[in-house]
Image (cartoon, helix red, strand yellow):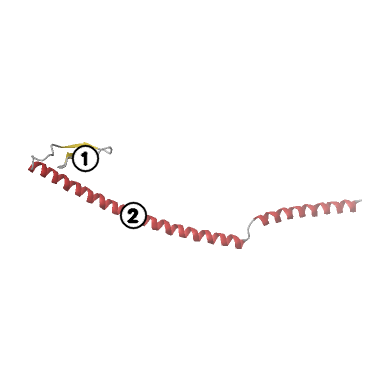
Amino acid sequence: MSAAKKELSVAKGIRKNKEEYELLANMIEKVPSRSQTNKKLEAIKKELEELHGKQRSLEAKLADRRNHLHAFNVILANFCRFLKECLMNEYILDSTTNMSSLHYVADEEGDEMCVGEVLDGSIADIKTEKS
């Protein structure tokens, strides 16, 4: 009887170990192999480098466009100032034109705009810097 009990406890231990082994084997099967993981890691690193390169390229393009926009704004401000001076000089020198008055109004952003009648009767809006 004691030999049977001993055999039973050994069999239970073996069965328990076998079940643990099966659980571990199933868990290992679910995890990808090291080579597969390394391949995925390399692919992700390559994609990340490509995205960083694309980001740097887009940031450089954005910086160029900002610089161009700033230069355009400076040119536009100078042109508006020049046009305003020309209109003022024309108004002062030639009071017989159809330009009855020059007056300033604020637009939606609060910037001043010079509004006056041009020779053909249309309205001229000249955006100028805030005073």
| Residue type at numbered disc 1 | Met
Look at discs 2 and 1 and give the one toward the viewer. 1
Left or right, residue 79 beside residue 45: left
Q: Nearer the viewer, residue 11 or 23?
A: 23
Mark found first going from the N terminus, 2 or 1: 2
- Percent x, y of residue 62: 35, 54
Q: How many marks?
A: 2
Find disc 1 in the rendering and name its residue.
113
Q: Residue at x 90, y 53 (%)?
A: 3
- Percent x, y of residue 36: 60, 61
- Percent x, y of residue 126: 21, 43
- In the rendered view, would you say 113 is above or below 82? above
Under tag 1, what secondary structure? strand
Crowding at dot 2, Cα within 10 Å, few <14 / some 14-19 / many 20+, comes out as few
Left or right, residue 100 beside residue 129: left
What number is the disc on residue 63? 2
Q: Residue at x 76, y 52 (%)?
A: 19
